[in-house]
Image (cartoon, rainbow, N blue to C red):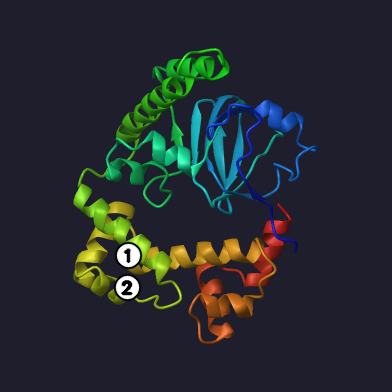
């Protein structure tokens, strides 16, 4: 299988400051003209907030199809694998922005808040916006100011409106999900996931990470269960499997090479581990994704 496309932020506007609003209809209309087909899996090098305003259908996020409908808001972070499905004539907009814009725009917000924003481990990637919410009003205002290129101080106006929009969504999220209020737990979990990322090839043992965090295994397990309803071992396994899936479909790497890079001494053990967690062998998985 050919590696799936890795899509970079490429603004159509002359005044590019790392932020763009793109109608889904435009993406669908020009789908054959893109370097990649938007209905096939592609990996993002930027952030994408998709707001569906009409219709119902589905959207592909990190190897799963999610149902979407009017007023569904999708959070996509960089590195995620995604694909559209235009068959049901879904209408809406993509708010896309670079990591540099993300850091700059939310510089004055707490690290805890920013970490929560685009974290698929903590929350579902889909938030349903209630009809009575004023989120839609702020979105229309953001659109209006975005297209008003003659506006004085446009970048700061957009930044402010986007921060309000994100804050409105987070307020809704508090009412729709088990919202974590203990920032100390969030802080430990953030360090834990960062350690997994940097020590992936070194250890898959939860006790190793607890030791690195200078807390007990029991405490780490308790935090993971409270935040994501998983054991620390589950969190490690999920991360490894996701990285394995992304590597398998996005490069010509052989599963034997991938096994060693993920810290497996024997490629056979990696195949067993992958099948235990996904129900598929690495090769079967590649075929399943190429046929979506």
Q: Who's the residue at 26% across and 51% down the image? A: 186
Dot 1, crowdedness within 10 Å: few (<14), some or many (≥20)? some
Q: Quadrant of the N terminus?
A: bottom right
Residue 269, label in figure: none
Horizontal and vertical percent position of residue 30 = 76, 32
Nearest to the observer: residue 82 or residue 33: 33
- Say which of marks 1 and 2 sits in front: 2
Nearest to the observer: residue 67 or residue 126: 126
Residues at discs 1 and 2 in contact (Cβ within 8 Å): yes
Instruction: Please count the marks in the image.
Output: 2
Horizontal and vertical percent position of residue 40 = 70, 47
Horizontal and vertical percent position of residue 278 = 54, 66
Q: Who's the residue at 55% across and 14% down the image? A: 148
Q: Where is residue 137, by image quadrant?
A: top left
- Give the SS element for disc 1: loop
When the figure is inspected, residue 245 is found, relative to residue 57, above or below; the finding is below
| Residue 238 seen in render | yes
Q: Which residue is mark 1?
A: 231
Nearest to the observer: residue 243 or residue 152: 152
Horizontal and vertical percent position of residue 286 = 68, 64
Q: Which residue is mark 2?
A: 206
Q: Where is residue 271, by image quadrant?
A: bottom right
Q: Where is residue 258, by image quadrant?
A: bottom right
Residue 67 left/right relative to 28: left
């Amino acid at each position: 299988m050919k590696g799936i496309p890795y899509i970079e932020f490429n603004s159509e506007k002359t005044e590019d400051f790392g932020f763009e609003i793109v109608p889904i209809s435009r993406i669908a209309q020009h789908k054959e003209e893109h370097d990649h087909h938007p209905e096939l899996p592609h990996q993002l090098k930027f952030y994408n907030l998709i707001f569906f305003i009409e219709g119902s259908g589905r959207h592909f996020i990190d190897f799963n199809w999610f149902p979407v409908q009017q007023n569904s808001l999708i959070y996509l972070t960089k590195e995620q694998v995604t694909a559209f499905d235009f068959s049901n004539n879904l209408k809406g907009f993509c708010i896309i922005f670079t990591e540099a814009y993300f850091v700059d725009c939310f510089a004055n917000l707490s690290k805890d808040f920013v970490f929560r924003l685009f974290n698929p481990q903590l929350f579902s990637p889909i938030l349903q916006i209630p009809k009575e919410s004023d989120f839609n009003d702020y979105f229309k205002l953001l659109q209006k100011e975005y297209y008003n290129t003659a506006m004085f101080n446009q970048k700061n106006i957009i930044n402010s409106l986007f921060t309000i929009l994100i804050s409105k969504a987070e307020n809704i999220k508090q009412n729709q999900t088990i919202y974590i209020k203990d920032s100390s737990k969030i802080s430990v979990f953030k360090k834990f996931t960062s350690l997994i990322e940097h020590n992936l090839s070194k250890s898959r043992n939860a006790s190793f990470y607890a030791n690195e965090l200078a807390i007990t295994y029991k405490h780490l397990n308790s935090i993971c269960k409270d935040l994501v309803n998983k054991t620390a071992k589950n969190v490690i396994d999920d991360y490894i499997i996701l990285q394995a899936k992304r590597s398998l479909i996005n490069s010509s790497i052989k599963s034997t090479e991938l096994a060693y890079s993920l810290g497996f001494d024997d490629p056979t053990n990696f195949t067993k581990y992958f099948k235990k967690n996904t129900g598929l062998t690495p090769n079967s998985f590649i075929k399943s994704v190429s046929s979506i």
